[in-house]
Image (cartoon, grey):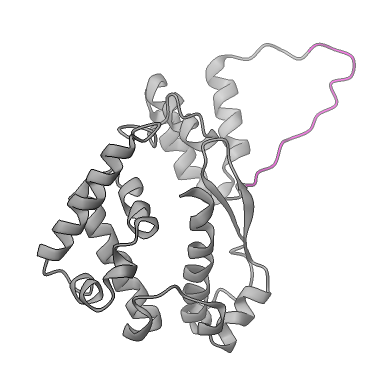
Amino acid sequence: MIITGTMPTQDVGPTILPTVSEQDAFEYAIHIWFDAPGRRAAEELNSLPTSERERVWADLSGQPSISHFAENVPTPEDPTMVQRAFTDLRQLILQSSLEPLRSAAQRRPEYIFHPNYMIRFLRANAFDIPSAMDGLNRHLKMKETLFGQELLTRDIRLSDLNTDDQAFLARGVYQYLRETDRAGRAISFLNFADPYYTGENLPSVVRASFFRFLICIPLVV
């Protein structure tokens, strides 16, 4: 995510800058981090208790020791626990009637139950098995909606995108870094000011963005 802002300038000459309170400094900082469309987010952040505010800042800056996103995630992961989670998730899926997950697992189990595939949803849900299954099913629903049932049980390729989808990618308005931040999260850049973000182009924007997102996943799992 790119968050832009402006910093007011003043000619202070050789004089020493005045001392400001911690509250004033924080309010100035959030005006730098959040531009006008994000003013509500800045106001909500400012209204939090100090301890909670520090954790939200840790979420933004990637400080895993006190941030929210690191809670309840085993670090480092215990291989025995991970294997048990694979087994539990597989059994829950086989017993489930959720669609399109049930049909996809029956049609191509080697894809749905591949460790590299299941681990994405387990880690995203702090190894909570029911939540991981729900996330997997919602992912497949979106994939089916965007690309059809025939592509449900294989990875989306560039050749699966139509001409308009690829035209959106070629504009460069959605990019990602090959490196992660210090918390191990993927970094994406979106330019919502691009005129391509209009109603008639929205289906292509969503399909191309979904494809880009899937490319980022190997960076962080």
Judged left or right of residue 113, residue 5 is right
Identity of the residue drawn at 56% across and 73% down: 197
Identity of the residue drawn at 40% across and 29% down: 47
Judged left or right of residue 190, residue 97 is left
Range of the magenta residues?
Answer: 4-16
Above/below status of 130 relative to 70: below
Q: Is residue 5 magenta?
A: yes
Q: Main secondary structure of the magenta part?
A: loop
Residue 44, given in percent of the width and then of the height, sits at: 41, 36
Q: Nearer the viewer, residue 167 or 97?
A: 97
Q: Residue furthest right?
A: 14
Above/below status of 131 relative to 106: above
Q: Quadrant of residue 180?
A: top right
Residue 128, given in percent of the width and then of the height, sits at: 23, 45
Q: Is residue 76 magenta?
A: no
Q: Nearer the viewer, residue 69 or 50?
A: 69
Residue 116, given in percent of the width and then of the height, sits at: 40, 56
Count of all numbered marks drawn on residues in the image: 0
Above/below status of 161 relative to 33: below
